[in-house]
Amino acid sequence: MARYKDSVCRLCRREGIKLYLKGERCYTDKCAVSRRAYAPGQHGQRRTKVSEFGTQLREKQKARRIYGVLESQFRKYFQEADRRKGITGEILLQILESRLDNVVFRLGFALSRAEGRHMVRHGHFSVNGRRVDIPSYQVRPGDVISVREKGKKNARIKEVAEIMEGQGTLEWLEVDRENLAGKVLRIPGREEIDIPVQEHLIVELYSR
């Protein structure tokens, strides 16, 4: 499957904000956005007038990059959100938040979504006792996500567990750090999804 392999720091600089794609590094002085707060490339420091379409496109790209989703998959998520009853933009974000790699990150078992995706692919997690290695797997209320015995021996998972010791979690999730497990209590509301995206602009873009 195709995957973006270039520097993710360029993505943050292109959007002009921290997308927290590199975990710990994003909180240090080494963060590329802090050091070079302008778009990457030869003409990155030029001032340009952004059209309405350009503004909508940037919001869509921002959401894609935050969750690490390719264009074709993101479009499928939008189509699914559009079919469901309710506010399309809000439902779209709820679908993205329900990805297993995101939930692993939200539970504090990984310091970034990319790291969560990597750990899931390597089979370190189970859902309701069954091994799941698909990062896009959609979790549901009541699902229990736990680190498998194999994963509990992983040095990085142990390191992250120590870093996150004593940290709280979101109200729609329940975490048991001692046993490295968590439970999805419910689907999060829009006010609980703390990403800097104006989802109505994404809806407008796909509705053109």
Image: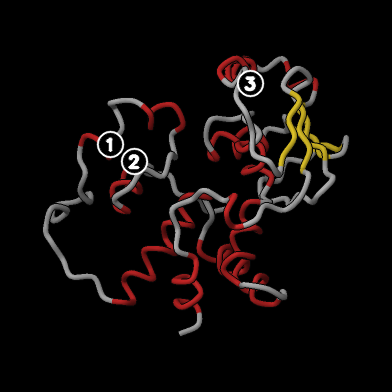
- Residues at circles 1 and 2 in contact by the CB criterion of under 8 Å: yes
Seen in the picture, residue 204 relative to 27 is either above or below; the reply is: below
Task: Using residue 46 as the reference point, say whether residue 39 is left or right of it.
Answer: right
Q: How far apart in space, not on screen, are marks 1 and 3 (Cα)?
A: 26 Å
**Residue marked by disc 3:** 157
The label shown at residue 9 is 2
Please report the residue visible at 72 percent of the width from the left and 75 percent of the height from the top: 85
Mark closer to the chain start, 2 or 3: 2
Residue at point 62%, 38% (across, down): 106
- Residues 170 and 73: in front is 170
* Number of residues whose C-alpha sits closer than 10 Å to that of mark 2, classed few (under 14), some (14–19) or many (20 or more): some
Q: How crowded is mark 3: few (under 14 residues within 10 Å), some or many (20 or more)?
A: many
User: Of marks 1 and 3, which one's residue comes earlier in the chain?
Assistant: 1
In the picture, the disc for residue 139 is: none
Alpha carbon distance from label 2 to label 3 = 24 Å
- Quarter of the rendering containing residue 152: top right
Which comes sooner in the sequence, label 1 or label 2?
2
Which amino acid, mark 3? Ile
Q: Quadrant of the C terminus?
A: bottom left
Q: What is the three-letter code of the residue carrying label 1?
A: Ala
Among the 4 quarters of the image, the one containing residue 150: top right
Label 1 sits on residue: 32
Q: Position of residue 198 (x, y in %)?
A: 45, 63
